[in-house]
Image (spheres, rainbow, N blue to C red):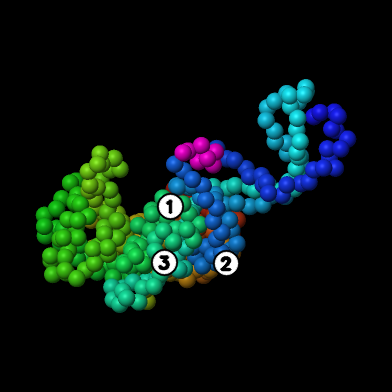
């Protein structure tokens, strides 16, 4: 700093509150350096489950960071790497920040609370936003939003977003599978184009079925043949596990909602729900997170919806042990893993709320 101006400089300066400090993680720095990866701040007032929050999310095209203010009294100096001696360098400004913004990589989610359910009737009543507006008001990046949109069977009808109803999805999926088999498509190795799937359904006595709905069902239960198509249209292959789980949950709701059912009998009912001549390997392990064994009776299962469980960790474990006195660890994990927000080892997280015993090759979880 020029010594002649040293005595009067500080009295001439004011703090510039327009500058903020934000932590740059390696992922965030990569996003900043990318030419086609603009960053965007979003204010989120409700999370994807409807809970009131007041979060600020920073999104790139494929990642999301939760922003939190971190107060501190430490000194943070930011300046170019230059020599401070001599008259060529003259620093004429300074400022201070009593806090910085901490960035934590998080999984982005779509705001489901603003999306109506569509069951195939009265589409004129849809008055929701379009897909771009939905992403703008959701705490997620565009790529995260598209991926979740396909997973929840989201659909855009007449430029309005909606989520297809469960029974409607099941009906369209069943017709789609039978139509593709009737047309002789090899769904496992050669696949089909979305246009071919739509045509198969609509010409099989379902000409009024909306193409957008059929496309959404295809993206929910089939997977892309590959990501590098070299300009060719994407072909879609059947995802037998996804379809098997879907039909299994439907079977649980139909046959094991009110009373327990013997697991051997349930497997027969589950298999009978698939379209004729469709071969899908099934195993009860595929449905973990959707059933319990009331009173810990072996050989019997009952449907258990995660939606009825409390959001509080202690209360959820308490309720699970009221339903079933002891659990295999791999059977209780799907019911509690969403509570592990700090990403602890699942064993450690479970032992905060329950006892864990090693019996043979298995771990048994019991109430304390």
Q: Residue at x 15, y 50 (%)?
A: 186
Q: Residue at x 73, y 36 (%)?
A: 77
- List the residue tagged with mark 2: 52
Q: How far apart are labels 2 and 1 at the CA level?
A: 22 Å
- Please say whether residue 108 is one of the residues in the magenta stretch: no
Instruction: For the residues labelled 1 and 3, say whether their Cβ atoms are less than 8 Å apart.
Output: no
Q: Look at the numbered disc 3 and give the secondary structure of its residue.
A: loop
Say which of 49 and 325 sits in front. 49
Residue 205 appears in the figure: yes
- List the residue tagged with mark 1: 142
Instruction: Give the image location of residue 188, x and y in percent.
Output: 20, 49
- Closer to viewer: mark 1 or mark 3: 3
Give the vertical position of 166 relative to 94 (above or below): below
Q: How far apart are labels 3 and 2 at the CA level?
A: 21 Å
Say which of 235 and 304 sits in front. 235
Instruction: Name the residue at the top extreme.
Output: 86
Q: Quadrant of residue 135?
A: bottom left
Q: Residues within 10 Å of mark 2 (few under 14, many from 20)?
A: few
In primary-sequence order, the first of circles 2 and 1 is: 2
Q: Residues within 10 Å of mark 3 (few under 14, many from 20)?
A: some
Say which of 266 and 85 sits in front. 85
Instruction: Give the image location of residue 169, x and y in percent.
Output: 29, 67
Q: Which mark is residue 129?
A: 3
Q: Quadrant of residue 296?
A: bottom left
Give the vertical position of 40 relative to 49 (above or below): above
Q: Quadrant of residue 267?
A: bottom left
- Please say whether residue 31 is one of the residues in the magenta stretch: yes
Residue 284 appears in the figure: no
What is the span of residues highlighted in magenta in the rendered image? 27-35
């Amino acid at each position: 700093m020029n010594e002649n101006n040293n005595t009067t400089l500080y009295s001439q300066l004011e703090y510039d509150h327009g500058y903020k400090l934000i932590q740059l993680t390696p992922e965030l720095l990569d996003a900043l350096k990318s030419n086609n990866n603009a960053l965007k701040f979003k204010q989120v007032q409700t999370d994807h489950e409807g809970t009131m929050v007041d979060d600020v999310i920073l999104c790139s095209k494929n990642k999301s960071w939760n922003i939190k203010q971190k107060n501190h009294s430490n000194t943070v100096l930011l300046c170019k790497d230059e020599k401070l001696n001599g008259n060529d360098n003259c620093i004429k400004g300074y400022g201070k920040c009593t806090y910085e913004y901490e960035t934590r990589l998080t999984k982005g989610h779509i705001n489901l609370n603003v999306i109506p359910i569509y069951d195939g009737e009265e589409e004129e009543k849809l008055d929701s936003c379009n897909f771009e507006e939905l992403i703008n008001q959701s705490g997620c990046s565009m790529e995260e939003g598209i991926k979740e949109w396909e997973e929840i069977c989201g659909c855009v009808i007449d430029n309005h977003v909606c989520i297809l109803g469960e029974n409607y999805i099941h009906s369209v999926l069943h017709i789609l599978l039978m139509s593709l088999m009737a047309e002789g498509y090899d769904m496992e190795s050669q696949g089909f184009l979305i246009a071919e799937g739509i045509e198969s359904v609509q010409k099989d006595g379902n000409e009024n079925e909306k193409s957008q709905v059929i496309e959404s069902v295809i993206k929910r239960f089939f997977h892309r043949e590959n990501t590098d198509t070299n300009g060719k249209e994407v072909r879609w292959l059947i995802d037998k596990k996804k379809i098997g789980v879907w039909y299994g949950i439907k079977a649980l709701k139909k046959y094991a909602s009110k009373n327990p059912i013997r697991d051997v009998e349930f497997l027969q009912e589950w298999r009978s729900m698939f379209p004729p001549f469709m071969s899908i390997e099934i195993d009860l392990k595929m449905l973990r997170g959707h059933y319990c064994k009331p009173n810990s009776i072996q050989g019997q299962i009952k449907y258990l919806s995660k939606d009825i469980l409390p959001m509080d960790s202690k209360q959820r474990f308490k309720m699970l042990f009221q339903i079933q006195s002891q659990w295999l660890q791999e059977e209780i994990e799907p019911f509690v893993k969403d509570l592990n927000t700090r990403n602890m080892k699942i064993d450690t997280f479970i032992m905060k709320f329950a006892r864990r015993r090693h019996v043979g090759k298995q771990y048994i979880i019991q109430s304390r």
